[in-house]
Every structure is written in C-alpha cells, then in structure tokens.
Image (tube, rainbow, N blue to C red):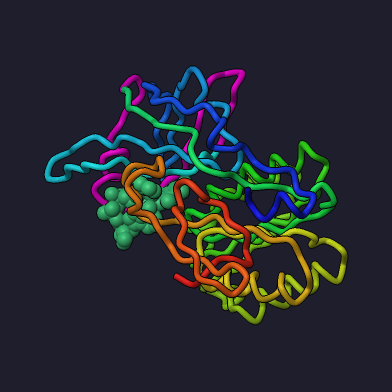
C-alpha cells in the first residue's frame, strides 16, 4: 500500500480491484485547441468513463503515411463523464503516435485500454490545495481540480507556459472553481524564484495544504523542496515512455527514494501518481 494510506489520506482506486477494459471508442470530436495541442472526445461505453483523476489510458494510434506506431501511447484522462459514457484527452502532437491520433475524424474508432494506474489522493484534512503544471501536465491536473471541488477543497491552479499562446485549460480550472494564476517564460514570471515566492505566499495565506504537480522536472523539484520544508502533503504525476501500460513489461521503471533507499517502481502500475517526497529528478 502507498505511503499515503498511513497518513489519513483516502487512497485512490486500487489497480488490483479496479476494472480495466479495452474499449472500442468512437470519436466525437478531435479538434485543435492551439498550434500544438488537440482535444479528442470519445464515446466510450463501459468502465472507461469511470476513470479517476490522475488515471490514464493506453491509446491505439493509427498508422499514417510513414508513421507506424507499434505500441499504444499513454494519455491521462482530461475528463470522464460516466453518465454520458464519454472520455476526453488533451494531447500534444509530438511524434508518430500522436500524429496518427491527430488524423482521427468524428465517427472513426480507436481502442483505449484503461482506466489504468493509481490516481491522485486528497488528504481528508485538506482545505486548500495548489496544482502546479506545465504543458501536458495540465491535462493530468485538471480532473484533480474537479475532484477537489466535489470534496469542498479550494484550488489554486498555477499554470506555467512558454508564452500566453501555450497557456492551456484556464477555463477548465475556473469552471472547477479554481483561482488561476499564469506564469510565463516570455515575461520571466515562470522563473523559479518567482514561482517559489508565489508558493510561499499561498502557504502563508493558508491556501496550500496540498501540493500537486505534473509536466516539469524543475517545478517538481521546487515543490518537493518546499513541501519537505513546510510539511505540506504532496504528489507528482510522472510521465515515462511505456509499452504495455499494465505492469508486465517493466519498460517504464524509474528510481524513487524511499527512507533514503533507492527503489525501482513501474510508473504504469505503482503510479503514475507518486508521493512527491519519493520522486527523483528526470
Ligand atoms: C501516464 C502518462 C500520461 C500522459 N498523459 C498525456 C496527456 O494527457 N497528454 C499528452 O499530450 N501527453 C501525455 N503523455 C505523454 C505521451 O504519452 C507522449 O507524448 C506520447 O506517448 C508521445 O508519443 P508520440 O509517438 O507522439 O511521440 P514519440 O515519437 O514517441 O516521442 C516524441 C517525444 O516525446 C517523448 N515521449 C515519448 N513518450 C513519452 C512519454 N510517455 N512521456 C513523456 N515523453 C514522451 C519522446 O522522448 C520524444 O521526445 C502521458 C504520458 C504518461 C506516461
Ligand atoms: S509499461 Fe509495461 S510495465 Fe509499465
């Protein structure tokens, strides 16, 4: 069991008991949201839409032209609506797999395996959390803001991006009741010193009893240092290249530090969400 279970924290779905299915999902929309990212919404009946915040799917990406992606590609659930049987993914078109995914049009189908992995946990004592994300990390963190809203936990979303054109998900976080602050490389506000000052200020205001991050090594290291110094609960959602997504192939193993020891874990099976204190730099 995860360390979180010993801290009075409600554990996320246990992968041993969770239902996983390989679902044939039909594309509803697959549209660009900016020059680099697309949002795909899928009609996915069955267990797929039960995905918890921080869980992911291994998605079949079609071959197109020269691109022949053999393995599926892991994507965090951006939204899941069990009543409508729909799931959404917000993805960056990066290489062969996501280029193929980007070609899907409404009415076409693809297979999605999931929901997979261990999602986020919220301490029962949490009143106000900070989510700090960059790039695709925001896709992973957005459902956490909704989970927090359902539990009556206030959220500050700190969104880091190269420039305003790359800022994602602001409306999504606001719709979940989050206070949103944006920091940019283009005006220097994403500088680590400034982000640290913002986090310390939020803590001093009593608005940070949980730290959550995804999408940036340097931001993870900053939150990790502050959570240790200030005694704040924290989690990080890790990204790692994967093959099976099911814990069988060990291609996603990373090193973690637990009680001073280096421990290897499978990101797909033991995570992708891990205690912030255990994460090591990537
Ligand atoms: C649990 C999990 C959740 C993820 N959620 C999202 C998401 O919601 N939206 C999104 O856009 N991306 C997400 N990713 C990253 C996504 O899986 C990769 O961007 C994708 O697999 C790249 O495939 P590709 O064939 O397009 O690119 P490739 O040609 O395979 O690679 C392009 C570039 O991306 C890097 N890359 C490849 N795979 C990964 C990976 N798994 N993690 C990080 N970098 C990778 C490669 O090193 C290379 O630099 C997630 C990854 C994990 C492990
Ligand atoms: S991807 Fe196969 S064990 Fe994690």
Q: Residue visible at 76% across and 48% down?
A: 9
Residue 204 colored in magenta in the image: no
Q: Residue visible at 76% across and 41% down?
A: 149
Quadrant containing the C terminus is bottom left
- What is the residue that sits farthest to the right in this orientation? 205
- What is the residue that sits farthest to the left in this orientation? 66
Residue 80 colored in magenta in the image: yes
Toward which corner of the image does residue 224 lie, by quadrant? bottom right
Range drawn in magenta: 79-108
Residue 277 appears in view? yes
The picture places residue 59, in percent across and down from the top left corner, at: 36, 36
Q: Compared to 82, does 137 lie above or below?
A: below
The picture places residue 18, in percent across and down from the top left corner, at: 55, 30
The picture places residue 80, in percent across and down from the top left corner, at: 57, 31
The picture places residue 168, in percent across and down from the top left corner, at: 54, 52
Viewer-closest of 86 and 57: 57
Q: Residue visible at 38% across and 54% down?
A: 252
User: For this view, does 49 lie left or right of residue 31?
Assistant: right
Q: Residue visible at 80% across and 67% down?
A: 202
User: For this view, does 129 lie left or right of residue 104?
Assistant: right
Viewer-closest of 153 and 64: 153
Residue 92 appears in view? no
Question: Total number of numbered labels?
Answer: 0
Q: Compared to 157, does 25 lie above or below?
A: above
- What is the residue that sits farthest to the bottom in this orientation? 193
Viewer-closest of 93 and 47: 47
């Amino acid at each position: 069991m995860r360390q979180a279970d010993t801290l009075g924290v409600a554990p996320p779905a246990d992968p041993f008991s969770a239902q996983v299915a390989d679902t044939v999902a039909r594309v509803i929309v697959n549209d660009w949201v900016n020059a680099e990212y697309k949002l795909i919404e899928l009609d996915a009946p069955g267990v797929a839409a039960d995905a918890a915040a921080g869980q992911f799917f291994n998605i079949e990406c079609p071959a197109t032209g020269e691109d022949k992606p053999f393995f599926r590609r892991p994507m965090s659930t951006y939204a899941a609506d069990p009543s409508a049987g729909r799931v959404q993914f917000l993805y960056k078109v990066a290489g062969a797999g996501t280029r193929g995914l980007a070609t899907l049009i409404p009415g076409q189908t693809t297979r999605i395996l999931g929901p997979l992995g261990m999602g986020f946990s919220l301490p029962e004592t949490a009143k106000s959390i900070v989510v700090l994300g960059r790039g695709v990390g925001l896709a992973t963190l957005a459902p956490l803001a909704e989970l927090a809203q359902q539990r009556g936990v206030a959220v500050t979303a700190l969104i880091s991006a190269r420039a305003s054109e790359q800022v994602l998900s602001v409306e999504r976080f606001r719709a979940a009741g989050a206070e949103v602050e944006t920091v940019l490389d283009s005006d220097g506000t994403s500088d680590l010193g400034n982000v640290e000052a913002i986090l310390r200020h939020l803590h001093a205001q009593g608005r940070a009893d949980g730290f959550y991050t995804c999408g940036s090594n340097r931001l993870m290291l900053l939150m990790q240092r502050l959570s240790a110094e200030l005694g704040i609960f924290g989690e990080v959602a890790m990204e790692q290249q994967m093959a099976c997504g099911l814990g069988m192939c060990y291609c996603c193993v990373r090193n973690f530090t637990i009680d001073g020891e280096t421990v290897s874990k499978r990101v797909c099976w033991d995570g992708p969400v891990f205690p912030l204190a255990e994460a090591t730099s990537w």
